[in-house]
Amino acid sequence: MSWMDILRTAFFALRGNWMRSALTSLGVIIGIAAVIMMVSIGQGTQKEIDKLVSGLGSQRLDISGAGGQGGGARLAQGSRWSLNDGDVEAIRTEVPEAQYVSGSLRGGTQAVNGENNAATNWQGVEADWFAINDWKIKDGDVFDAHDYSGANKKVILGETVRQELFGDDSGVGQTIRIGRVPFTVAGTLQSKGQGGFGQDQDDLVVVPLETARRRLSTSQSMPPGAVQQVSVGVDDAKNLDTAQAEIEALLRQRHKIQPGADDDFTVRNISQIVATRTATTNLMSKLLGAVAGICLIIGGIGIMNIMLVSVTERIKEIGLRMAVGAGPTDVRRQFLAEAMLISLIGGAIGIAIGAGGAVLIGRFSDLPVSLDATVVVLAAAFSIATGLFFGYYPARKASLLDPIEALRAQ
């Protein structure tokens, strides 16, 4: 018999008891649908992690002032001005792994251009801040050395603020008001969109650090030269832990912190945050994969069970086939084709349900989903493998029947 004849015969055999065949394929349908949705969610989550890494920088450390004792009560993190320009310069010169270093200040403000205004955040930064955070200039220019040293009233706008203040115009060269201070727009930043934590990365205005001290931080009781945060770009991701240890030792020495005493600063290692999130994602993917695998095994066992029942019910038919010339190989192919057909039909339905479910999850929930053709091919391969693996034993059992004993069966 040709393969087309075998498939045609298998189709008619299954159609003769279609309800049983449909229920048998249910486990495969659920398993394949689960595989597609699991892989799609896993890939989508990994892309979100990659986006988080690109937004935060995979080779950076952030140092901020830690809480201390004030007035008998412990202050919140960042509430004490424990970092200053001297710390920034010391890290820059004494930590060889530190490729870029920038102190910064930040705060909330109202940016105004005529009748347009935007509630946004300002960042006072040094020159290396742009490289550390991977910000690129879209229009205009970055600050020059004189802007940083002279506290010039220049500003660079994020894309969200630019659109709210100027619409389709770049705004470069025009004057806006930040708080009560007029600033000249020196340039605009290329858009980054939503960050890994859901924040709008483009909702900011950037000014030179000394400008922020003199013009925007006047209401804050701040020591001369103080900074809220120091960002460090490390030359190689492998050196992050080394650089962190060196920075912690350097700052403890500079701040005269005694052995055993708490630090008055906190170092945040971005790679540790990303590694934790990646490990959590991988664990969830494995759990979902285990559920999908169990469903496929249950579906495969169902196929094997029904095919064994089918062999028992069709013993006389098998004997007649062998009596008219069919060999064991033909019988084995016949029953294996039936098992694979059940699995393939269930797989096709499962692919449709899984792909549709992934699209709906991505549209109506906060879970990140990424569906591509590789997922569909993987699901189809699982379906074929399930039919082959669980259908082989019943097919082999049918092929080993003795024709004479089979014809005698009632």
Image (cartoon, rainbow, N blue to C red):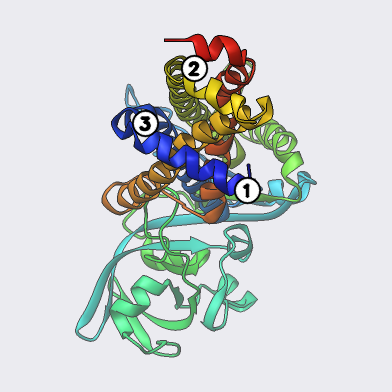
Q: Amino acid at mark 2?
A: Ile
Disc 2 to disc 3: CB gap under 8 Å: no
Which tag, 2 or 3, sits closer to the chain's start?
A: 3
Q: Amino acid at mark 1?
A: Ser
Label 2 element class = helix
In this rendering, the label closer to the viewer, 1 or 2: 2
Which tag, 1 or 2, sits closer to the chain's start?
A: 1
Label 1 element class = loop
Q: In which quadrant will I find the N terminus?
A: top right
Q: Decide which of 378, 134 is in the foreground and name it.
A: 378
Q: CA distance from mark 2 to mark 3?
A: 19 Å
Q: CA distance from mark 1 to mark 2?
A: 66 Å
Image coordinates of residue 183 in percent, x first then y, are 39, 80
In this rendering, the label closer to the viewer, 2 or 3: 2
Q: CA distance from mark 1 to mark 3?
A: 52 Å
Disc 1 to disc 2: CB gap under 8 Å: no
Image coordinates of residue 410 in percent, x first then y, are 41, 10
Quadrant location of residue 25? Answer: top left
- Does any portion of residue 133 appear in the rendered image? yes
Give the residue pinned by disc 2. Answer: 315
Image coordinates of residue 262 in percent, x first then y, are 53, 22
Q: Amino acid at mark 3?
A: Ser
Give the residue pinned by disc 1. Answer: 58
Classify mark 3: residues with Cα within 10 Å, few (<14), some (14-19) or many (20+): many
Task: Identify the residue shown where x is 76% and y is 40%.
Answer: 239
Quadrant location of residue 122? Answer: bottom left
Give the residue pinned by disc 3. Answer: 21
Is residue 320 positioned above or below 163 on the image?
Answer: above
